[in-house]
Amino acid sequence: MHAGPLRKLSSALVTGTSPHAGEVRYTMQLGGSAVDLNERVGAALTIRATGAKTCVVCGRSVTKFFGQGFCFPCFRDAPEASECIVRPELCRAHLGEGRDPAWERAHHDQEHIVYLSWTGGVKVGVTRSTQVPVRWIDQGAVQALPIARTPYRQLAGLIEVALKRVLADRTDWRAMLRPMDPAPDALIAARPRALDALPQELKSHALPDDAVWVLRYPVDHLPPKVKSINLDKEPEVAGTLAAIKGQYLVWGDGRVLNVRNHSGFHVELT
């Protein structure tokens, strides 16, 4: 048995002959142990919430979370919960500003990528260059295509705002958990429309020739119907682990646990 507070699943892309294609490997960090989850797909897995909860930033014990695993003071003050996490166009790191300027320099005043991905359809997103391909894995993308590179987050956010006029920017988690086999050139076909939507002053950041990444997930099978569970209401989920995709654990009976949304919940895994 492993026990400890949940954090988002750690992931890596194991590539073969192509540097842009490979198998996703998942680990869960619990109580100082790294649990290999890929080897548990197709086998029995039980996760039980103990009832304890601690803030993912400061470690304070809480009875209620704000956002994804924050106590209220950290939700209000921590840079990890700032508005520009969700709306990068509001980022002010390049101006030396933010809730924690040093944190902002290390995380947001850095090179960012604007990308297209396939998560059941074409969507646009933003991530720090060092988070490629982890960000795509977290979203459950089966394909991803960088289309712009910027020196800091706010510029990437402005590009995303422009592209949201012609492309989706959200993932339907139920669609993402259905079997999907997009056309090999789906993102390549979408790229011209995305680049045409760029404002003239941002076109210098475009990447017109980058290659498509292909990601394969550990899946035994995907149930035809899925139901999200909340560990506050259903503290134990047990059965055969059928798949892992994005930040979701999928059991054979269709129950689904969004691990990232349960960050800070203390659990036991057997």
Image (cartoon, rainbow, N blue to C red):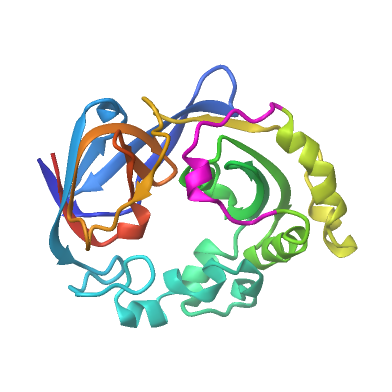
Whether residue 267 is visible: yes
| Residue at the top extreme of this rendering | 17
* Drawn side of residue 69 relative to residue 101, left or right: left
Q: Quadrant of the N terminus?
A: top left
In percent of width and height, residue 207 lies at 78, 44
Q: Residue at x 54, y 51 (%)?
A: 172
Towards the viewer: 176 or 63: 176
Whether residue 210 is visible: no
In this picture, which residue range is highlighted in magenta? Answer: 168-184
Query: Is 173 covered by the magenta stretch?
Result: yes
Note whether 35 is above or below 49 in the view shown: above
In percent of width and height, residue 162 lies at 77, 63
* Drawn side of residue 96 relative to residue 40, left or right: right
Query: Is 128 covered by the magenta stretch?
Result: no
In percent of width and height, residue 198 lies at 83, 57
Q: Quadrant of residue 242?
A: top left
In percent of width and height, residue 171 lies at 56, 51
Towards the viewer: 247 or 103: 247
Q: Residue at x 40, y 81 (%)?
A: 77
Towards the viewer: 31 or 253: 253
Q: Residue at x 37, y 36 (%)?
A: 244
Towards the viewer: 44 or 88: 44
Q: Residue at x 20, y 56 (%)?
A: 234
Note whether 154 is above or below 163 in the view shown: below
Q: Quadrant of the C terminus?
A: top left
